[in-house]
Each structure stands twice: as C-alpha cells, then as structure tokens.
Amino acid sequence: MSPPAPDSYLKRIARAPAVRALLIQCGAAPLTLAIIYLMASFRLPVDYWSVAVVQGLLAAGLTWKLGLAVWWRAIQLLFPVALLAAQALHLPSWLFLAVFLLLLGWYWSTFRTQVPYYPSSPAVWDAVRQILPPPAASDGRPLRVIDIGSGLGGLVLYLARQRPDAECSGIELAPLPWLVSRLRAAASGSRARFTLGDYERLDFGRYDLVFAYLSPAAMAGLWRKAAAEMRPGAMLASYEFAIDARAPDRTIRATEAEDALYIWYF
Ligand SMILES: C[S@@+](CC[C@H](N)C(=O)[O-])C[C@H]1O[C@@H](n2cnc3c(N)ncnc32)[C@H](O)[C@@H]1O
C-alpha cells in the first residue's frame, strides 16, 4: 500500500460539501445574532424558533451564493429547525449517541469520499463473472479480483463461489459493512477476503480485475490511479458510473432494467 500525498486528505476534507455546509452554518451564526439583536431592539417577538428560522434562511442563502448543489439549500434551511424539533421531543440523550455511532459505522467518511453504500444486484455480479478470463488464461497463477468499496460483500462472495480458481477480495472503508462482509464470509465458509481500508492506498497493479461501484465524484481520481498502476492485460469495471477522461472499451447491460457496466482494458 502506498500512502496518498500528505495534504490531499486535508484538502479534500475542506472541499467536501458536508464540511462546507457546516462552515456555512458557523458563518451564518454571527449574522443571525446580529439580526436577532436588531429584531429585539425593534421589539419584534424573538424566541428559539425565530432564531432557527433566521439561521436556516441565512445558511440557505449563503449555500446558494457559494454554489453548493441545490439539495444543500433545503438541508441548510431545515437543519436548525430540525435540531430544535428533535430537542422538543425530549428523547433520552443515549439515543442520539447510539444513532450517531450507528450512522458513523455505516457511512464512516462518506462526507469525504461522496460514495455512500448502496448495493449492486445479483444480475450485475453475474455480468462481472462473465467478463472474467477463463482459468487457463492467467499463466498458472490465480486470477486476482477485487471489489473496491465492497459494502456487504455480495459480489465478492458470489465470485468466490463461482470461480474457485480465483482470489476474490474486497476492501471497504466503513467498519460496519466491512464487519458484516467478514461475518458473512465466516458463516458461509467462503474463501473471500475482506480488508478494512481505503482503496486509494491499495496497489491496483496486483489485480487482474478491479470492480468499482462508486459515484461520479470518485471517477476522475479512480481513473488516474488505475491508469498509473494497472498492469497490461488487467481490467477495470465500473458499474453505473463512466469516466470522462476515457471512453470505455466495452459496455454491457446485465438486464434491460440495469445501468451499464463499463469496462476498460489495459
Ligand atoms: C455503492 S457501494 C457499492 C457496494 C458493493 N461494491 C456492491 O456492489 O454492492 C460503495 C461502497 O464503497 C465504499 N467506499 C467508498 N469510498 C471508499 C474508499 N476510498 N475505500 C474503500 N471503500 C470505499 C462505501 O463505504 C460503500 O460501502
């Protein structure tokens, strides 16, 4: 594994929409206080709800001005009011911690990667199986396949069952899906291997097939990494999301209802 450039994480965290949204809420707070102070000095009614509404309106306006995606305006507008509403429910404080830990385990650094969990279907898994080279084509050594962002492990477990000659593995950043995939492999006696980690620290040069089901935000970086590291004869497959920098060499649709599976040969 090779570490990414030292400042790249910090830069990407600072650019992440969720972090920008949080900074906007912080930036709106002094303006809200100033407006509430003015409202109070004109003897207008002021309570926590009016503070939340003013804060939400200011944050939504700044969000629009700074060009964040359109859905962030609604999130920013509703966030302070939702905070007050949640407080008014008088729920036990441990519940907030429990839900926070659950979401943290499930999403981990989705705010940075902009790749949340959603699964591919068995039809896609089978389309991936069909593009694998036959056993004889891999010079006697086992074929190496990896799902980068393996989620609950469905694709890797399927390929490990279907291709006993191949080394099938997955790498997942979020601890909870990774744990589920490990438990599923152990419970079914599968040879599939699951690693907890960041695929950006992985050497793609070890694999014959790298499968990705990520998001548009990840594709440019994925291509730079694949182009730099993948060996001649290897394949990169991406479900649903194409790469702007290079047209795919092949496109398959598992079923008419499915999105495309894009394939690049090296
Ligand atoms: C859309 S899901 C796909 C899950 C699985 N590959 C499938 O096909 O069902 C994307 C997964 O990638 C994981 N992920 C995102 N960025 C990652 C990274 N840099 N390293 C490892 N996993 C990552 C997310 O946590 C999420 O579980």
Image (cartoon, rainbow, N blue to C red):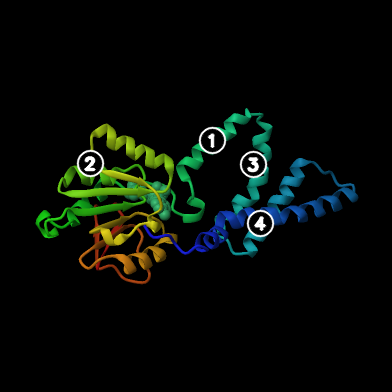
Query: Residue 99 bears which disc, if any?
Result: 1
Q: Which residue is mark 4?
A: 24
Q: Which residue is mark 3?
A: 82
Lower sequence index among marks 3 and 2: 3
Q: Which residue is mark 2?
A: 191
* Quarter-of-image position of residue 151: top left
Name the residue located 66 percent from the left edge and 29 percent from the top edge. 90
Number of numbered discs visible in the structure rendering:
4
| Whole-number angstrom distance, CA of label 3 to CA of label 2 | 46 Å
How many other residues sit within 10 Å of disc 2, few (<14), some (14-19) or many (≥20)?
A: some
* Closer mark to the observer between disc 3 and disc 2: 2
User: Residue 182 placed where, x, y %?
Assistant: 33, 38
Q: Nearer the viewer, residue 2 or 82?
A: 2
Is the residue 52 above or below the residue 241 in the image?
A: above
| Label 2 beta carbon less than 8 Å to ligand 1 | no
Amino acid carrying label 3: it is Ala
Name the residue located 24 percent from the left edge and 48 percent from the top edge. 168
Amino acid carrying label 2: it is Arg
Lower sequence index among marks 3 and 4: 4
Quadrant assignment for the N terminus: bottom left
Q: Nearer the viewer, residue 119 or 26?
A: 26
| Whole-number angstrom distance, CA of label 3 to CA of label 4 | 17 Å
How many other residues sit within 10 Å of disc 1, few (<14), some (14-19) or many (≥20)?
A: few
Amino acid carrying label 1: it is Val
Lower sequence index among marks 4 and 2: 4
